[in-house]
Image (cartoon, rainbow, N blue to C red):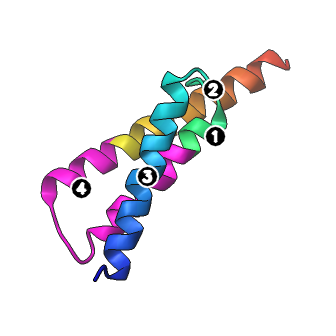
């Protein structure tokens, strides 16, 4: 039987994989806010699963995933903000 932490973690994995599929199928690009947000939400959910099932390697990759996606959001914001000036 799956516990809540496993369900949250598996949901996060599904979200990250969907984002990657949408990117590779051409439905999203790295410049879509939704792509970056899907990655942040998915990685955050995987991090939540580590409350119960700690794994240093997973922690490190999810922190990196969140950081990279956050930089992507900042670049999107700057691009949109600067193009309006």
Q: CA distance from mark 4 to mark 2?
A: 29 Å
| Quadrant occupied by the C terminus | top right
Q: CA distance from mark 1 to mark 2?
A: 11 Å
Where's residue 56, x and y in %? Answer: 14, 57
Foreground: 28 or 2? 2
Foreground: 64 or 18? 18
Question: Mark 1 or mark 3, which has the lower sequence index?
Answer: 3
Question: Mark 4 or mark 1, which has the lower sequence index?
Answer: 1
Q: Is residue 43 visible?
A: no
Q: CA distance from mark 4 to mark 1?
A: 23 Å
Q: Which residue is mark 2?
A: 27
Q: Which residue is mark 1?
A: 34
Dividing the picture into quadrants, the one containing residue 74 is top right
Q: Which residue is mark 3?
A: 14
Question: Mark 1 or mark 2, which has the lower sequence index?
Answer: 2
Residue at 30%, 79% (x, y): give it: 2
Q: CA distance from mark 4 to mark 3?
A: 17 Å
Q: CA distance from mark 1 to mark 3?
A: 15 Å
Answer with left or right where residue 56 lies relative to residue 69: left
Residue at 54%, 23% (x, y): give it: 25
Residue at 38%, 71% (x, y): give it: 7
């Amino acid at each position: 039987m799956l516990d809540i932490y496993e369900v949250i973690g598996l949901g996060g994995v599904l979200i990250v994989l969907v984002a990657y599929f949408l990117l590779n199928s051409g439905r999203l690009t790295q410049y879509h806010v939704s792509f970056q947000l899907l990655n942040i939400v998915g990685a955050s959910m995987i991090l939540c699963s580590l409350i119960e099932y700690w794994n240093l390697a997973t922690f490190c990759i999810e922190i990196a995933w969140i950081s990279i996606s956050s930089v992507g959001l900042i670049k999107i914001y700057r691009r949109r903000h600067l193009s309006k000036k």
